[in-house]
Image (cartoon, rainbow, N blue to C red):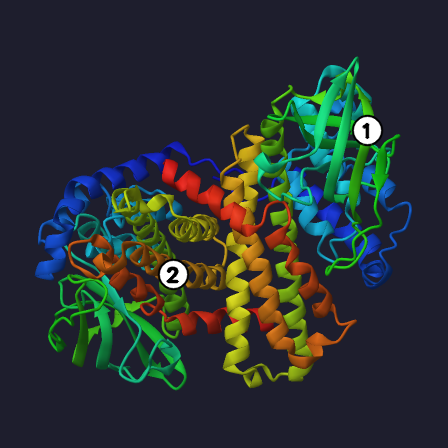
Amino acid sequence: MEFELTEEHKMFQKLGRDFADREIEPIAEEIEKEGKVPEDMLGKLAAVGLLGIAAPEKYGGLGAGFLTYILAVEQIHYPCSPCSWLLVANEFADVLSRVGTESQQAEFLPSVVEGRLLPGWSFGDETGGDGPAALNTTARLDKDRWVINGTKRFQTFGHVDGPTIIFARTGEGQVSSFLIPKNIAGYTSSKPMTLLGSRGLEIVDTYLHDVRVPEDSLLGGRGKGLEVAQMVAVASRLRQAIQSVACAQRALDEAVKYSKERTRRGVPIASMQAIQWLLAEMAMRVEPARWSTYEVAWSKEQGEDTSMQSAMAKLFAARTAKEVANMAIQVHGCYGLTKDYRIERIYRQAKMFELTEGSRDAQASVVADALIAR
Amino acid sequence: MEFRLTPEQKDFQERARRFAQREIEPIAVQVDEDGRIPPDMNEKLAREGFVGMLIPKQYGGTEAGMLNCALVFEQLSYPICQCLEAMGNNIVGRVITLCGTEEQKQRYLPLLAQCKLMGSYAFTEPGTGSDPKSLVTTARLEGDHWVINGIKRFHSVGHLAGPAIIFANVDGTQTTAFLIDKLGEGYRCSKPFELMMGRGLETIDTRFEDMRVPKESVLGTVGGGFNILFSITAEGRLTLSAIAVALAQAALDESVRFIRDNMGEGRQSAVSETTKWLLAEMAMRIPPARVTAYRIAWLTDQGQDTRMISAIIKLFASRVATEVTDMAMDIHGLSGLVKGSKIERIYRQAKQFDLTEGTSEVQRTIVAGSVLMQ
């Protein structure tokens, strides 16, 4: 065991931190108010290489590992702004480089890495909840075309041009995944929903009505949908876990700052045991959440199956974000409720991670089933 | 970064696991009952090289380091953690290595590594737990001897021959550590306390009545007691954390076993959501605690100052132990209350980590202090 970050890790950490300080932190409040990430953000992230960390070099990526990606996300998410969701390009590349055909990779990876297209995916449909196994979206082969029908719920940036991975039934008990361009004929989206957690993170419902795509739009082969879904899920759980960690770290830092500024009877509240108790409870959670996320990201990078471990890491980190934000807002007292303090926004965001991309309860099921079956 | 164990670490872990299965598991029920540990247990632990892990080779130790030591502690305490009286030699050995004179090292370290002497340390007094300023044990210089008076409470392994590190005040203000031989004249032992976690690791009160020890018995410098105390507590917290992790793991494993035994063949689907939720809640806490403990042990081996960060893991791992064992109880239902059931024993053992080597309240003060300093 060796817990020292490599030079490459440190480099990307710094790259992420500098970018967040320079490009995101100054406009984080504005994004929240406007409910919109600036159009040029994706291009800016691409320009410094943050969209291709995990992508193969031959498609313009940097070929670094998944842990490196996770370390960068942690820094980019420190302002707790939706901008870090744009980094999913890395996860898309990670999945595509393993299950995509050469021509699928060549078609989509370069433009995703360069930030010209924003990739996405969608598991859930109207009835399916989290489980791709319960899908009612269908795809049937009509000569040399797949015809896809169904409604996908809660697709992040599902209306912004780019490739998306859609899961659909291709027969009795058979789920397949398709790599299709968003917004092609028959593909429409709802208006973005306004979320509790992060204004500017645009989530839409996607309607697929006789969407016709070439036969080779299958991703990973016919009937391999659940495997692809698993792969996507592991990557996104780990990203959500580290976003949670960043959110918790920020909440702690805001609480520390406030507790030093705010005085009561002439002394900073930081000197009160009740406040110190809260700060310690926060710090105690952040460190373990961070390192267990790193550990699982590392294992994934080594090619290990981390479906259960990633579920645990997300479960724990999301809990950490929620609990830490709750204590941090407590330190702020009533001021924490006002928009004048960042903690108000962070507190709202913190709950998100227990619900998105596999709810807390879905993760719990994954973990428990794996334990009992082992 | 490298989260995989090295061959050496794996070897220690594996040997400790086998030792625990072979030598400790079979007697766990009996030890819990009457506290009687086979007389050759300590010698066997020494023969495996588990006792001198923090003692340099030139003094007969294995110099294996803190991470290996934590791995061994974790495995050995998995069946029951009351058989480890010899393992305290690791910590006492380390402190003597760090702070002792050449003569103290030569005199004690080889015998500690072989378990011919049983090391211990005592700070707590009837009137003070963790507040160093309230210490009332005194040492005064008379010619070429120190004369020690006072009572030390909860002195584990205080009744066995060997060196003890004792903290006393010199001239009223100078807290000083003394390395003394136990059981000499003026050294009186009480009967062992009856403790919730059962017997085995005997804890006593020690009364010093004009105990005379040679002038050279000072460990470190006169007035330098706190440095030594901090060193002991950092290592002590880490080893306790490793034990707490093992206990939580045992509680989880026992719960999974209980569920399997009661669900019948092929009836995984019959396990209720509530039970699964509890399992996941237990499971998700353990990896973060474990990896954080390992990381801090690793930092110790890198020569870094872990006095603050070790409080984080102690606070966290002890919380994990109480929470996980509590949920394990819930899974077992009433049968968990029955004496003789494994989970009943585990549950009784879990609370100690919250209270020993600095209560969680003390750890929180330390953690908050370090957070506010940053």
In the image, farthest residue toward the top: B143
Whether residue A255 is situated above or below residue A354 in the rendered picture: above
> Is residue A287 among what the camera can see?
yes
Q: Residue at x 60, y 37 (%)?
A: B134
Q: Residue at x 81, y 28 (%)?
A: B210
Q: Which residue is mark 1?
A: B210
Tell me residue A186's x, y (percent). 13, 78
Chain ID of residue with mark 2: A
Which label number is shown at residue A323?
Answer: 2
Label 1: how many Cα within 10 Å (few below 14, some 14–19, many 20+): some
Which quadrant, please, contains the C terminus of chain A? bottom right
Tell me residue B192's x, y (percent). 82, 51
Number of callouts in the render?
2
* Residues marked 1 and 2 touching at CB (< 8 Å): no
In the image shown, does B166 or B104 lie closer to the viewer?
Answer: B166
| Gap between marks 1 and 2 measured at Cα | 52 Å
A144 lies left or right of A285: left
Chain ID of residue with mark 1: B
Identify residue type, mark 2.
Answer: Glu
Place residue B131 in its image quadrant.
Answer: top right
Task: Kindly state the secondary structure of the residue where label 2 is placed.
Answer: helix
Place residue A187 in its image quadrant.
Answer: bottom left
